[in-house]
Structures are given as structure tokens and as C-alpha cells.
Amino acid sequence: MKISKLLITFILSSMLFSMTASKASAEKLLAAIADWTGGEISCQVAVSILEDELGYEIDRIVFASGTGLWEAIAAGDIDFACESWPSYAEADEIMFNGDLIHGGEVKMTYSGDGSVTILGTVGITGMSDYYVPKYWADANPDFQDYTDLNDFKSDFATMETGDKGRLIGCPVAGWNCHDQKRLDVLGLDFIADELGTETASLAEAQGMYDRGEPFLMYLWEPHWFFGVNELVGVKLAPNAPCETFTEANNWEVCGPDKWPGTGWAVDYPMNYGNPETFAKPENQKALEFFGKMALSNADQAAMLVAVREGAELNDVVAEWKANNKSTWESWLP
């Protein structure tokens, strides 16, 4: 009897040691989770593959988008973050050094200090604009594009904006949309209303849509909102950079034909990380995976709709993985 107890104790101890050693040997990374649903989906796709298929242990932290996140990655406090859109990332030209490659083509070349590294593009292609409901555009055939907005500003005015129109603007200052600056540069008599979160902005717009009211809003594609509502873009002018519109130059504008007077460029969102972390031999599998990741607009949009309909985000990603094994297996090292 005594021998049996000793044997059991030894076996349990061995199992516990083995489990502890296995956990200790797993490569551990800290990821910043995006503060909008599409980015959160992209990050969960990446994190679940890193954990379930490549043996990494990923801790997650909620960290608002913006320069502070880039600085935390450069300092090594956070290992990587997901789905940064170049049009919104003013730190990329300062901190990246290298090519942004999408679909095998070089889309941008950076010459910054290299304190943050491009891990690879997410795969989706992003587009942004200001939008009005199609029912309002159909009822106002004289409205053609953003240059006509002042003629209809009273339709978009609220108690808070008085005789000015209202734009449901980019919800987070850290996204660097510069909505009010754009409106002012273009001479549009509108006020940008920053509601603080994607959820708040969409709830406001959805309520107005359901009531058949006119509204002007900032939005991007891919997004579930387009799957349940018919919107028309105001066709902001094609993107043209302004070299002096930087913090170092006190945000000196170049006129209405240059950013931020123009619209956004077509975006190739990327995952990005700390260069020292991803130079380590033990993290080469993760680096190679990020270089191959290629999530499509259609796949992200389908997951966005599922989350919108009430499904848990992690469950949606798990179902996508189960149904698209041949897709993500091609991303593995």
C-alpha cells in the first residue's frame, strides 16, 4: 500500500513537472489587440494560429491605437500589434525602414529609423470615405459629391451644430483622420463629431438610418455596416500627400488638393512588431507566418457580419479556421 502511494505521488509529480516544463518552453509574446472589430478579428486569426499551430503562448493587452502604441512596441514593452492602416499611422514613416509588400508587390518603401518592423500585410485592402444613406442620395439627385455638401448642410444640422452640418467623424483621435481639419480646408460648413468608440459611432448612424434620417459619416471598408445598410460615398478627392502636414511642421496644410483635404489612400494594413523580438531564432516561425498571412476582404467581412449578429468573436474565428483550413495552412512556415 505504501509503495502504491509513493508510485502515484511520483507519477503525479512527473506529470506536473512535464506540464510546467512544456509551458516554460513555449515562446511567449505580448500582443496589442486592435480597438475596432475588424482589427480584432484579424488579430484573433493571427493569435489563434500562432498558439494552436505554432506553439506560441500569446498574452493580449488592450491598447488604444496611435503613436503611443508604436512607442511601446519600439521600447519592447509590447511585442506586436495587428492591422495598422498606413493612412492612419503617422508614426510609420518615422519608425519603419523597409518595403511594405502586398500580393508580391512593393506598395510603399519606408526610410525611418527601423525602431519598429513590418511583419507583413494582413491581406485585406482598405478603403475609407465619407458616406450618406442611399435613400437620401436618391431623394436629392442634385447631390453628386463632397463639393455639394454645403448646399445641403441644413439636412445634416443638429441642435448641437446649429446652422452647420454634422459629420459623424472618425471615432478615435488616435486614428489620425483629421476630420475637422479636412472640413475646414475644403470650406465645408460642417462640424466633426468624435464619439469616442466605433460602437458609439455606428449605433448613432444605425439609429438614424432606421428612422430614415439623413446623416454624413466616416467609415471604411471592409465593414459589416455595408452589409446591412445601403450607403453612397461622397467621393473625396484622390489622396495626395502633403509633406508639411506633420507634427514637426506644426501641421502646416498644403491646401485643399493635398492631405488632409483629400481622401485616404488605398490601404494595405500590416502587422508590426519589435525588431529585436522578431530577430530572435525562437521567433522565426512567427515572423515567417506573418510574412505569409493573407486574410481576404470577403473572409473578414463575413466574420464581421457574424459578430454583428451576436456571435462571440473568438467562436467566429474558430469556425472560420475550421472551414478554411487550406487557406491558413498555406500561411504556415
Image (tube, grey):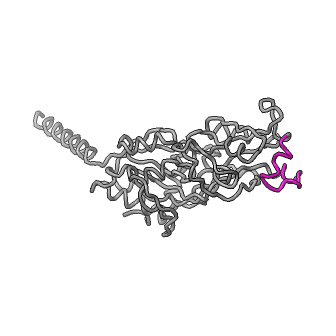
From the top left corner, tell me how far across and down residue 28 is, in percent: 32, 46
Q: Nearer the viewer, residue 128 or 224?
A: 128
Q: Measuring 47% from the left and 62% from the top, which residue is drawn there?
A: 109
Q: Measuring 32% from the left and 50% from the top, which residue is drawn there?
A: 277
**Extreme residue toward the bottom, this view:** 104
Q: In the image, 137: left or right of 281?
A: right
Looking at the rendering, in which quadrant would you find the N terminus? top left
Looking at the rendering, in which quadrant would you find the C terminus? bottom left
Q: How many marks?
A: 0
Q: In the image, 171: left or right of 16?
A: right
From the top left corner, tell me how far across and down residue 176 is, in percent: 58, 44
Helix, strand or loop: magenta stretch: helix
From the top left corner, tell me how far across and down residue 205 is, in percent: 73, 41
The reply to whether residue 48 is visible in this rendering is: no
**Extreme residue toward the left, this view:** 3
Q: In the image, 329: left or right of 223?
A: left
Q: Nearer the viewer, residue 42 or 190?
A: 190
Q: Nearer the viewer, residue 245 or 279?
A: 245
From the top left corner, tell me how far across and down residue 103 is, in percent: 51, 68
Q: Is residue 258 magenta?
A: no
Q: Is residue 136 magenta?
A: yes
Residue 168 lies in quadrant = top right
Q: Nearer the viewer, residue 117 or 186?
A: 186
Q: Which residues are magenta?
A: 135-153
The reply to whether residue 325 is visible in this rendering is: yes
Q: Measuring 57% from the left and 44% from the top, which residue is drawn there?
A: 175
